[in-house]
Image (spheres, coloured by chain):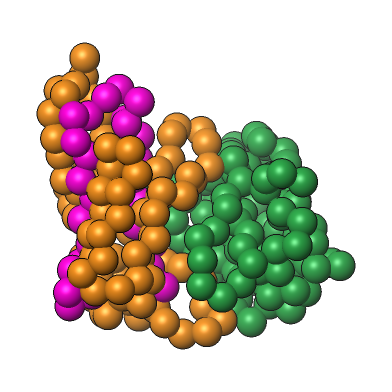
Chain colours: A green, B orange
Amino acid sequence: GAGVSQSPSNKVTEKGKDVELRCDPISGHTALYWYRQSLGQGLEFLIYFQGNSAPDKSGLPSDRFSAERTGGSVSTLTIQRTQQEDSAVYLCASSLGGVGGYTFGSGTRLTVV
Amino acid sequence: SQELEQSPQSLIVQEGKNLTINCTSSKTLYGLYWYKQKYGEGLIFLMMLQKGGEEKSHEKITAKLDEKKQQSSLHITASQPSHAGIYLCGADGGQAGTALIFGKGTTLSVSS
């Protein structure tokens, strides 16, 4: 597509439920990144994919968080047993890899009640 | 690990005034990226700087990377309401296979 697409744009879920967030990167972009943005915290790196593999998962905050990428394209970020502190905007970005700017999606605003 | 500190955290300027936002890194910068974010939207790429002393401009926004490559500044001339938003700097630590890290952002408000 023309840009990075994320869905849903908003998600309200009950504490303890699982959620899946989807990211559809720009066609041909081999690198894909997930970040989390909380109020006053800036962008927190979660995970990075190069193709289908994840060389850097260091940012995932707990084992409740996981992500996969299939076919070198769409990625899904899954949060199990959601907690209130998981409430944030989850941003996805893609790039051609190597040096260069990222293109970000508009994000998914997750609210855990 | 590398950290980026942005200053000021927030800024209110009158329309037409100039302003500067700073981004200071705890380590040498190999690539410095400036992004702008409007509320509820993703980040829009503004500029990338790689070489010490490099300066780039886009419309009324100019970004510089200092010679020692540990600080960058973003300067807006004759600010407009359309410049309002959150400005974030992102850094490439120079290691292959790592993602950009970002500062916490500077929130800019422009009063008319």
- Residue B31, relative to residue B62: is it above or below? below
Can residue A80 be seen in the rendering of this structure? Answer: no
* Residue at (71, 69) in percent of width and height: A30
Location of residue B70 in the rendering, given as x and y in whole percent from the top left corner: 21, 73
| Left or right of residue B22: residue B42 | right
Q: Which one is nearer the viewer's eye here, B83 or A34?
A: B83
Can residue B33 be seen in the rendering of this structure? Answer: yes
Location of residue A68 in the rendering, given as x and y in whole percent from the top left corner: 76, 67
Furthest-right residue in this view: A71
* Residue at (52, 84) in percent of width and height: B96
**Quarter that holds the N terminus of chain B:** bottom left
| Left or right of residue A22: residue A108 | left
Magenta residues span B66-92
* Residue at (28, 42) in percent of width and height: B61
Q: Is residue B83 magenta?
A: yes
* Residue at (21, 14) in percent of width and height: B112
